[in-house]
């Protein structure tokens, strides 16, 4: 039964129009806010020289430059390199593929950590020095360079890596399933015959880190739609899947897939569904006054709450028209650069990385929380436009995201200039965890790649993350503690 605009307006009025909040993360303040907005939600206590919203009393202290020029960390923390493109090798002998992106961890036997790592490689294989190898039986389209690898981490010097899927394109954030598999997502929707591809792209695929036999003969999960996929999460209670789309002209959409009646999730079960099984839907949001909201960038204060209705997608395989273009103005709510997601606290945390001239209002990042029980979106994090990304300390462009076992969020930065892993606490403080010190530009014009794949080990003691270019996976350890 849809939640009507009138119903939401009534419930919001009685609850205080968006004051009621859900989840342990709470409302997180703007980092890098300026002007009156900074005074309102960025001025909690003494601020550090890093800029508004960053508080050195929270977190683990200042970052110490790395003598090896890779990763700056707080005092007492350390990192080790797990894989590095062009340096480490797969079990089959090829170099680790490049352009590391979305990653998830899985508990292996006797303390082993398994990781599935996407490789965001777009277009023909000839364009890349280290594409994902075409391992027999694991290839979808032999013309495509992307895919994902499975990494087995047994500790320092004891790492193995092999191909999980190959022949896919632009594998971006993806998502972990409650039944212990990985959904790798193509952020590219080339048709067969475009850019050298021999098959249609723009799909999600399931990868089993425990059983390579389950990954043979890769099958696209067409039921989840064909578009520029970014991330996916699973509602373990209702069985719904939520997916993000990173696209513009017009801006992309946040999707919900509702399984067919009686369907039960499990390892490999999605592959058994018909291409048109279930229902793929896009959101239509409205504010507490019942007014339709065309774009999520219109929310300019944390704590903003929108009600959500769901509208069926007419043609999920986009045979004639891209999915996001199948809706008229006023039918669905859009957002710019919908990126990473994470399921926690009974709902989905969703990132909109930034908004510029293609959006109604500019920002340098939002994190929303979708509550499926209340059918609401609540703005948790808002990053104001960073006036000078070249300066260390200010934050912009959130991308991959995880919920920390020590409280709050950990976010991978994909902005301009300096790149960080940073935390955001329950009460609105932000703090740096790591800085990418690997300059892939020049001394005169430095350039630093984005962080990706931020995720904790199953025991919570190790934080894994990637530097996308050239492709380095690191494991960060140290004196983690609860952030209050």
Image (spheres, rainbow, N blue to C red):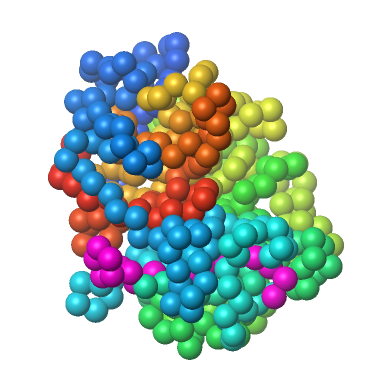
| Residue 273 percent location from the top left of the image | 59, 82
Which quadrant of the view contains residue 204? bottom right
Residue at the extreme bottom of the image, as rendered: 213
Q: Is residue 367 magenta?
A: no
Q: Is 190 located above or below residue 296 in the figure?
A: below
Q: Residue 358 location in percent, x, y?
A: 70, 32
Q: Report how many numbered discs are placed on residues in the image.
A: 0
Q: Nearer the viewer, residue 251 or 299?
A: 251
**Residue positioned 58% across, 57% down in the render:** 120
In the picture shown, does residue 17 fall above or below 128? above
Rendered location of residue 64, percent (x, y): 27, 32
- The image quadrant where one finds the C terminus is top left
- Does the rendering let one see residue 376? no
| Res 411 → quadrant | top left
Check the image and report above or below for 249 versus 187.
above
Q: Is residue 151 above or below residue 391?
A: below
Please tell me which residue is depicted at 59% across the width and 43% down the height of the picture: 337
From the viewer's side, name the closer residue of 333 and 190: 190
**What's the magenta region?**
142-159
The answer to if 143 sits in the magenta stretch is yes
Q: Which quadrant of the structure image shows residue 356?
A: top right
**In screen coordinates, is 373 left or right of 390?**
left
- Residue shown at 55% from the left, 74% from the top: 165
Please identify the residue farthest to the top as the structure is shown: 35
Residue closer to the observer: 124 or 284: 124
Q: Is residue 442 visible?
A: yes
Q: In front: 277, or 319?
A: 319
Q: Residue at x 23, y 16 (%)?
A: 46
What is the x, y in percent for residue 232? 50, 60
Specify the quadrant that holds the N terminus.
bottom right
């Amino acid at each position: 039964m849809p939640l009507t605009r009138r119903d939401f307006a009534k419930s919001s009025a009685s609850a205080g129009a968006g004051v009621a909040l859900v989840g342990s993360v709470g409302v997180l303040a703007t980092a890098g806010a300026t002007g009156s907005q900074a005074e309102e939600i960025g001025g909690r206590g003494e601020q550090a020289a890093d800029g508004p919203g960053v508080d050195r009393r929270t977190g683990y202290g200042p970052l110490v430059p790395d003598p090896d020029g890779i990763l700056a960390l707080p005092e007492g923390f350390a990192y080790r390199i797990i894989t590095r493109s062009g340096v480490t090798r797969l079990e089959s002998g090829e170099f680790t593929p490049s352009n590391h992106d979305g990653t998830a961890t899985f508990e292996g036997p006797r303390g082993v950590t398994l990781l599935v790592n996407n490789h965001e490689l777009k277009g023909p294989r000839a364009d890349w020095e280290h594409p994902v190898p075409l391992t027999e039986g694991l290839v979808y389209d032999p013309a495509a360079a992307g895919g994902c690898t499975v990494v087995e981490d047994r500790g320092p010097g004891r790492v193995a890596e092999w191909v999980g899927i190959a022949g896919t394109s632009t594998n971006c954030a993806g998502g972990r399933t409650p039944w212990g598999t990985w959904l790798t997502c193509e952020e590219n929707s080339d048709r067969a015959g475009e850019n050298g591809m021999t098959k249609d792209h723009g799909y999600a695929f399931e990868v089993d880190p425990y059983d390579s036999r389950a990954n043979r003969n890769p099958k696209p999960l067409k039921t989840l739609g064909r578009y520029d996929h970014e991330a996916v999460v699973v509602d373990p209670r209702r069985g719904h899947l939520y997916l993000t789309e990173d696209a513009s002209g017009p801006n992309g959409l946040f999707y919900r897939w509702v399984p067919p009646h009686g369907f039960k999730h499990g390892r490999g079960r999605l592959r058994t569904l018909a291409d048109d099984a279930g229902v793929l839907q896009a959101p239509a949001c409205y504010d507490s006054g019942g007014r339709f909201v065309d774009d999520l960038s219109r929310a300019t204060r944390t704590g903003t709450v929108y009600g959500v209705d769901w509208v069926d997608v007419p043609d999920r395989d986009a045979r004639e028209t891209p999915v996001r273009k199948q809706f008229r103005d006023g039918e669905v709510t859009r957002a710019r650069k919908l990126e990473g997601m994470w399921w926690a606290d009974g709902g989905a945390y969703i990132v909109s990385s930034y908004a510029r001239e293609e959006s109604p209002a500019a920002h340098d990042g939002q994190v929303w929380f979708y509550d499926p029980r209340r059918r609401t979106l609540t703005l948790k994090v808002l990053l104001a436009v960073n006036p000078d990304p070249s300066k260390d300390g200010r934050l912009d462009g959130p991308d991959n995201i995880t919920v920390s076992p020590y409280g709050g969020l950990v976010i991978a930065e994909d902005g301009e200039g300096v790149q960080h892993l940073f935390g955001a606490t329950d009460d609105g403080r932000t703090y740096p965890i790591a800085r990418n010190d690997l300059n892939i530009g020049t001394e005169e014009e430095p350039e630093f790649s984005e962080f990706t794949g931020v995720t904790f080990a199953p025991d919570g003691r190790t934080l894994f993350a990637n530097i996308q270019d050239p492709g380095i996976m690191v494991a960060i350890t140290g004196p983690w503690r609860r952030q209050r």
